[in-house]
Amino acid sequence: MKIRIANGRLIDPVNHIDAQRDLYIAEGKILAVGDVPDGFVADRTVDAKGMVVMPGLVDLSARLREPGFEYRATLESEMQAAMAGGVTSLACPPDTDPVLDEPGLVEMLCFRAKNMNCAHVYPVGALSFKLEGKRITEMAELVEAGCVAFSQVNTPIVDTQVLMRAMQYAATFGFRVWLQPIDPFLSKGGVAHDGEVASRMGLAGIPVEAETVALETYLSLARLTGVKLHLTRISSAAAIECIERARAKGLDVTCDVAAHHLHLCDHDIGYFNPQCHVVPPLRSQSDRAALRAALADGRINAVCSDHTPVDDDGKQMPFAEAETGVTGLELLLPLTLKWAQEEKLPLLKALARVTADSAAIMGITKGGHLSPGARADVCVFDPEGWFKVSREALKSLGKNTPFLGLELPGVVRYTLVEGRIMFGA
Amino acid sequence: MHNPQLNRKGELQHLLTLDGLPAAILKQILDIAEPFTEVAEREVKKLPLLRGKSVFNVFFENSTRTRTTFEIAAKRLSADVINLNVATSSTNKGETLLDTIDNLCAMGADMFVVRHATSGAPYLIADHLRNTGREHISVVNAGDGRHAHPTQGLLDMYTIRHYKKDFSQLTVAIVGDVLHSRVARSEIAALATLGVPEIRVIAPKTLLPTNVERMGVHVYHDMREGLKGVDVVMMLRLQNERMQGALLPSSQEYFKCYGLTQEKLELAKPDAIVLHPGPMNRGVEIDSAVADGKHAVILPQVTFGIAVRMAVMSMLAGQ
């Protein structure tokens, strides 16, 4: 099917385009931008007047809850959420049940996802067997099965020798290692940022040093092993400084932030709102300001949803006992737009953080941009529209978000995956 | 954000914390408690204020003292009292907290007195009652995690007012494990609201919450320094499990540095009073000579506690 997306404001950070251009799609690929190719007759023309046409979003972390947690969400439901959110490529962390530590499991997930013909799913394999931090996984086999990187998610490797070996082994093959800086001891028992709010509310604190102590270890070992390291879900100003110091000494390292960390801080916990129980914890107002600024100037390379659907039973508990995480696939674009608006950033720059930059971290070349020949993964959204966050509006089975009831800028009108209109009429 | 413990008229709907509660309401509770202290001295220790009402003491964490005083308070107000000890453990969760509450609502509860090991649990219950249209059922927080123990804070304020009359000239020291103490948090909130000009906390750094000074307190690590010239000494209980490990090396060393002895107490004002929420660890946080001495008002605290709890319950019941 040949599609022409006409009259829209086309934004493609990779090609530095922010202009009114038509987009021509054929056989699942981008055919041309701007001038109509010779002999092109559209089977369908989508009028995008007043709308922004951009590459489909690339999300660095979206839990689809399969296998193992189908009572919280299913591949079907979360794929619908991805489509509604304009997300066409996503990395899926290995903290499923069983953990993504065997090629067979990864193959099964890729197979199931592919059959749905929705978002492209890129599994992130477990760095250690069962995420237990004892035995490294069959990384070469896992990459063959489809993994794009290796991670420990929220369960850090305690034994630093194992961590070093895992990095060395990954570096042997040039595999990416994604680590979330968490010191297992300093964060032990903690549920909120260790500061004034947690102290007043009697919540056990997680100090910023739980992040920076782990970070310094990871950065040292990255220098030693030469591994391609990406740091996930940075939460504090001090962590950004650590990373910048390492970069100044020549270490090539990337990092990301979760979209909710750009907008919330520990004060938002309010009266023990369990929707604000997240990992890493929401930190202080000054940390939030630092994260926003660092994402704007590129010290933080990308923003992701860290999508974690949790059922109501998992959240209707006292703060400390409630499950962690927020639903996010459908909020990634609106929260990024809100941040860009508030920071007065041009869309071309802001949208790179959820497309080109995140694609580069994942190492995918066929998505995240609209160059001729690329996959026709496209998101068309109304920048003047407001998305009212409600249980009914969310396609994800996870309704767990502290943004319920809020109006956020940007409404996705169409999502195309390989030239097929998967969302929007 | 709505204040979850006040109704739309600004009256007390639930008692969840003292933090943020207006001074007028704190004083109102203390004033209402005043005549209730006499009930205990009557031949018939009963008032009909809660007749026909069902008060459920729902304790997810063990307690004998607090539960008993709530039970006595409710019974003196002629309520029907039902005590439930709901054993919970993280490994065997069983029924959820809100399922338990729904079941008790179905049994006709008018008031819940809740103790829970997790900070904020009573908020969840109050929120649930509001969301399900059962605002007429009140929740009294009888201690949640490290967060709050409002009736303990109130009875401490009652005790201080009884002996010192005026809050506006006092120097008060809180001594011990502030980090894990819901009592300390409620005391600090109430003292600040009632206008105490100088609140001190005395503890080693391992037992103080981060940024504790932002709660409006002066921090002392040297107990002798901190006790100088104080009018009120509020001791905190030190849990056994804290005494060994990374927080404190031993109970002996703790007593040496932070135990209240006669000798240290002499640094306070001559008419200083000593409070303790109980149960006391003699020889750990307090010396027997002080606990039984003339400055101690620990037993009157217990008596006042019943009156204060009667006041809270009668206010919540709209009497």
Image (tube, coloured by chain):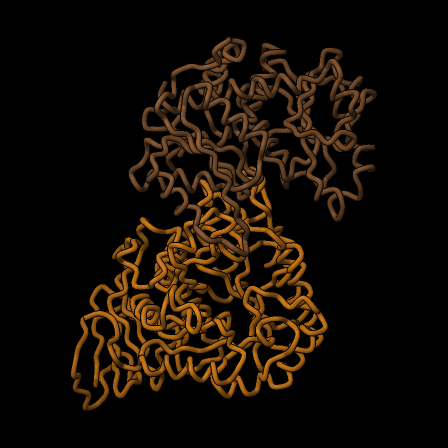
Chain colours: A orange, B brown
Q: Is residue A421 visible?
A: yes
Where's residue B59, x and y in %?
51, 38
- Judging depth in this view, the residue of A267 and B181 nearest the camera is B181
Q: Report which quarter residue B11 is drawn in.
A: top left
Q: Report which quarter residue B68 is drawn in.
A: top right
Tally of numbered tags: 0
A277 left or right, relative to B171 = left
Q: Is residue A352 visible?
A: no
Where's residue B74, x and y in %?
45, 24
Q: Report which quarter residue B64 is drawn in.
A: top right
Residue visible at 55% across and 60% down in the picture: A234
Residue visible at 34% across and 86% down in the picture: A373
B7 left or right, relative to B93 = left
The residue most toward the front is B43
Where's residue B280, x and y in %?
70, 29
> Looking at the rendering, in which quadrant would you find the N terminus of chain A?
bottom left
Residue visible at 48% across and 71% down in the picture: A96
The residue most toward the bottom is A39
Where's residue A78, x and y in %?
35, 68
Q: Is residue A242 above or below residue A225?
A: above
- Judging depth in this view, the residue of A327 and A1 nearest the camera is A327
Residue visible at 22% across and 69% down in the picture: A424
- Judging depth in this view, the residue of A160 and A225 nearest the camera is A160
> Looking at the rendering, in which quadrant would you find the C terminus of chain A?
bottom left
Q: Is residue B301 above or below residue A323?
A: above
